[in-house]
Every structure is written in structure tokens, then in C-alpha cells.
Amino acid sequence: MILRDNFQSVFSVHFDWSINIHTAVANLYRRLSDVGIDRPYLKRFVLPEWWDDTVAISDAGQADLCMRIARSLNLNFRDLLNPERKIEVTSGNCLFKHAKNADAEEFRTAVSICLEAARLALLGTPDYREVQDISGNQVRDEILAVGADWPGLRELANWCWRSGVPVLHVPNFPTKAKKPDGLLLRIDGRYAIVVCKKSRFQAWLLFILAHEMGHLIRGHLNSDTIIVDAKIGQDADASKDIQEAEASSSAIEILTGQADLRYRSATVMRSPLALASAAVRVGKKHSVEPGHIILNYSHSQGASYFRFGNAALKIAENGQKSGTAVLQNALVEHLEWDRLPEESAAFLSRITSADTTNTR
């Protein structure tokens, strides 16, 4: 009887303790969910593969959980540890483009994740040169000088990496997080570019990358700030935002050699095959990536034409790697992974979906 009572007493204490720990962890996940960071995202992308919530059966374990989440998502550790404190999603000083004030707050979670990803990428990119205030044509000429047919997505991404400007494709965010097309980040005086748009076509991601480069070489960031491009289109809202018009002009200059070049035809081309063939022919003649010609032409025809443009891209880019794969490969190739702590490298690999099997 005594042994049974003692066993029941010990079991009851342990059971209560487990309930309390479970409640504490569940409460943390609920508070994070309230600011748009869901538990499945944490499990899949933030916490290491071996993580189990039973690790948090002690104060030290709970602190470890909070530290891992805070470090990866750029959150305040004390906010996570103290259930009485409100969790604030911080994303630094941001300039939101093409986003209303009310909508801008919806991007904070995505920006916070991109900020941490960019910090890690810069840590693994020790060498850099000053690229602010150079011209779009200088970028273009340097790419062509090494034998490229044109400044394509791979070529421009490699140029950025060689110049010490990391380029990341970050497509993985919490379900409720609103993501921008792209970002230019200045961190401790250095620059990084993050592309968030999901597209199988290289041409779409190429223009986003060139647009962010346009912001950089135009000197739009003179302090540690983040430009958040909610939506990027050639000269989108140019009349309302001079910086956006300048960035797009520089992007077109990098890609074509002429900042104001627009592709047009005497009659509207309604055949995707004819458009793709013409783009390849003109691209080879003038060292312009055919996919950009297709998008440039589609833009000049208006939004309703893009269904033809995307069909033409499917033809022109047939057999090529996806834009996502191109940027993933550039990351794997150029980043000095050994400079990152092992778990930080794993986190960066997960949120970029990059295969880093042979990097360490």
C-alpha cells in the first residue's frame, strides 16, 4: 500500500509537471501564431530535424526553444520567454514600395525572415567591392566581357556574388505571411538581395534581381535600411515613385544596354511561338536575354497580354532550369558555408530549399 501510494504520488507530480511544460510550449506556439508564425512552419523550417518538444521539459529547455526561434526569425528572446510580454515582429527600417500603410505591416514577418537570411549570407560572403553608383551599362559590360551571351539570371546572380552582394531566393514563409516580390537590404554598410517571388520562369526572377540591382547602383540606400518591393513591374507607378522608375530604368539598362528600351511590333503578335522565335532572334543579335524581350514586349501591350507572354516564355525557356534552381545553385556555389555555425547553415538551407549536401 505504501509503495503504491508513493508511486501514485510520484507519477502525479511528474504528470502535473508534464502538463505544465506542455502548456508552456503550447502557449508559446499560440502566441507566435497570433503574429502569423504557425507551428508547422517552425517545425519544418526553423527548428532542427531532431527537435522534439519534450526537450523543453525544463527551464533550460524552454530557453533553448525560445533562443532557437528568436535567432532564426529575428525576434526578441525575452518576448518569447516571458508569456506576459507581447511578441513584436521587428524588421528594421523599411521603405515599402507599392504597398499601402495598412498593407505594409502584413509584410513584417516575411521581411524579418529575409533580414536574418541576408545576415547569414553576408557572414558567408567575406569579400566585396563597392558597387554603389556604377552604371547599369558597366554591370552589363562586365558580364559580357567574360563571354556571356547576355546578362541572364545566372550571369547576373554570379556577378552579384562575385561583387560581394549575396542573392537569395527565399520562397518559404509562414502560411499567413504576406511576401514581397523582392528586397534590397543594407546591413552594416553591405548589401544583399532577396527574391521571394515564386516562378518557374527565369525571366521573371531576372527582372526582379535587376530591379533590386537598380536600387543599389542608383544609391537609394545610404544607411542600413531595407527596400521592400511588394510588386515589381517595369516602370510600375513611375509617376508616383521616382526611385521605382529609376530602379526599373537601370534594370532595363543592365539587361539591354538602353535604359528606355521598349520592344514593340507593327501589329500585335498573337502567336506565342512567333513571339518566342522573334525574341530568340533579336536576343542573339543584341545580346539580350530572350525571356526579358518577351516580358518587355508583353508589358508594352498591357496586362491582358501576359497570358501570351507566359506561353511564349514556356517555349523560349523549354529545357532550361527553373529560375528558382538557378538562384539556389548560385547560393550553393558561392557562399562560404564553413563560415556559418552549423545550425545557421541548416536554417539558411531549409528556407531557401538549397541542396547543401556537399558544402561542408
Image: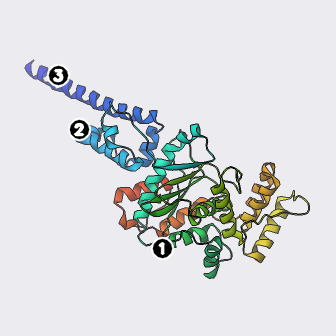
**Picture layout, residue 54 above or below residue 232:** above
Q: Quadrant of residue 301?
A: bottom right
Residue at left offset 46%, top offset 64%: 190
Q: Are marks 2 and 3 in contact (CB under 8 Å)?
A: no
| Mark drawn on residue 327 | none
Residue type at the position of mark 1: Arg
Outermost right residue: 267
| Quadrant holding the C terminus | bottom left
The residue that disc 3 covers is 8
Residue at left offset 65%, top offset 74%: 137
Q: Nearer the viewer, mark 1 or mark 2?
A: 1
The residue that disc 1 covers is 129
Residue type at the position of mark 3: Gln
**Picture layout, residue 266 above or below residue 177:** below
Q: Nearer the viewer, mark 3 or mark 1?
A: 1
Outermost top residue: 1
The secondary structure type at the circle numbered 1 is loop
Q: CA distance from mark 2 to mark 3?
A: 25 Å
Q: Tell me residue 213's x, y (percent).
A: 59, 64
Q: Is residue 34 left or right of residue 235?
A: left
The residue that disc 2 covers is 59
Q: CA distance from mark 3 to mark 1?
A: 68 Å
Q: Tell me residue 55's x, y (percent).
A: 28, 41
Q: Quadrant of residue 342?
A: bottom left
Q: Nearer the viewer, mark 2 or mark 3?
A: 2
